[in-house]
Amino acid sequence: MHMPRAFSRMTLMVTSVRVERLQDITLAGVQAEGIVTDPKGMDARDALPAWIALWDSLHGPGAWDSNPEVKVVAFITLVTNIDV
C-alpha cells in the first residue's frame, strides 16, 4: 500500500479462497493464523482457547459466539518481485 509495486521484494500469490464458519477452524488452521504451539510453549490443547480469546479481543465480546462466515485465503510467499 505504501511502497510502489516495482520496489517490492516479496509477492503473495493466492492459491485458494473458501468460505467457512468461524467455529469450524481446525488446530492446523489456528496454527496457520499464528497461534504457536510447541513443547517449550503453549500446549496444543490451549491453542483453541487462545484463538477464541484473540478473536474476541479483535472483534468484540461475543464475536466468537456469533459464528460468522469467514473467508479462508491460502497463499504462498514468493521472495521476489514478479513484475521485474
Image: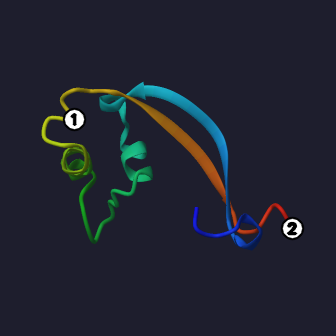
Mark 1 is surrounded, within 10 Å at the Cα level, by few (under 14), some (14 to 19) or many (20 or more) other residues, namely some
Q: Is residue 37 left or right of residue 74?
A: left
Question: Front-most of 5 and 68?
Answer: 5
C-alpha gap between disc 2 and disc 1: 43 Å
Image coordinates of residue 5 in percent, x first then y, are 72, 64
Q: Residue at x 28, y 71 (%)?
A: 40
The part of the image, by quadrant, that contains residue 61 is top left
Furthest-left residue in this view? 61
Q: Residue at x 35, y 29 (%)?
A: 24
Please identify the quadrant where the C terminus is shown.
bottom right
Residue 84, above or below 23: below
Mark 2 is surrounded, within 10 Å at the Cα level, by few (under 14), some (14 to 19) or many (20 or more) other residues, namely few
Question: Front-most of 41 and 69?
Answer: 69
| Callout 1: SS | loop
| Callout 2: SS | loop
Image coordinates of residue 60 in percent, x first then y, are 18, 43
Q: Is residue 40 left or right of residue 62?
A: right
Please identify the quadrant where the N terminus is shown.
bottom right
Q: Earlier in the sequence, mark 2 or mark 1?
A: 1
Image coordinates of residue 57 in percent, x first then y, are 19, 50
Q: Residue at x 26, y 51 (%)?
A: 47
Disc 2 marks a residue whose amino acid type is Val
Closer to viewer: mark 2 or mark 1: 2
Furthest-right residue in this view? 84
The part of the image, by quadrant, that contains residue 73 is top right
Residue tagged by mark 1? Answer: 64
Residue 70, above or below 36: above
Residue tagged by mark 2? Answer: 84
Image coordinates of residue 30 in percent, x first then y, are 36, 47
Question: Front-most of 34 and 73?
Answer: 73
